[in-house]
Amino acid sequence: QVDFNAGMVRLEPGTTKNDEGRTFPFSIFPALKALLERQRDRTDALQQATGQIIPWVFHRNGRPIKDYRKAWRKACDAAGIPGRIPHDFRRTAVRNLERAGVPRSVAMKLTGHLTESVYRRYAIASEGDLAEGVAKLAAHQEAQAKAQADRTLVPFPSDKARTKQSKS
């Protein structure tokens, strides 16, 4: 359900794979907010044109969408990415949340993962991610080496030198 007043997408308990409900605050995600508002405007226009009441944000000519798979395949083919499945978005969401630095506990709540082990199956690191990790490690190592080189070492006087200083 899309609650425009609260700025939330709500998945009610019993409607998800694990039967747990969850919320996604879309009002602070500008691109998602704009997409949902555009769709709401289209729905409002259709309601005015036909006089029907449409309780869904996403629908097919005012009727609930029963099966989207054929339309999904056509859209993927047209976009030049055949063979994609809607579930791929879950993996993309996990990767984007990880890259954005969202704490894992929050990311798991947003994506509906109940266990760390299942979540990790979706947190796939690409070769680009690995290269970025190594680049960060190299930058850190270089900064540490520079900090070490910039230190001024003051030799600790030997016992013999201290004895001479104390006699003077």
Image (tube, rainbow, N blue to C red):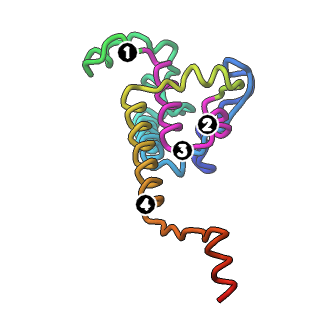
Q: Quadrant of residue 103?
A: top right
Residue 134 in the image: x percent, y percent?
Answer: 41, 37
Q: CA distance from mark 3 to mark 4?
A: 32 Å
Q: CA distance from mark 4 to mark 1?
A: 62 Å
Q: CA distance from mark 2 to mark 4?
A: 40 Å
| Residue beneath disc 1 | 71
Most frequent secondary structure within the magenta stretch: helix
Image disc number at residue 107: 2
Q: What number of labels is visible?
A: 4
Q: CA distance from mark 2 to mark 3?
A: 9 Å
Residue 96 among magenta residues: yes
Residue 83 among magenta residues: no
Of pointers 1 and 2, the one earlier in the residue sequence: 1
Q: Give the magenta range.
A: 85-111
Please name the amino acid that badge 4 sits on.
Answer: Ala
Examine the rendered structure and indicate whether residue 83 appears above or below residue 38. above
Q: Nearer the viewer, mark 3 or mark 1?
A: 3
Please name the amino acid that badge 2 sits on.
Answer: Ala
Q: Residue placed at 62% from the left, 68% from the top?
A: 158
Please name the amino acid that badge 3 sits on.
Answer: Gly
Q: Nearer the viewer, mark 2 or mark 4?
A: 4
Q: CA distance from mark 3 to mark 1?
A: 34 Å
Of pointers 2 and 4, the one earlier in the residue sequence: 2
Q: Looking at the figure, which quarter contains the C terminus?
A: bottom right
Q: Nearer the viewer, mark 2 or mark 3?
A: 3
| Residue beneath disc 3 | 101
Image disc number at residue 149: 4
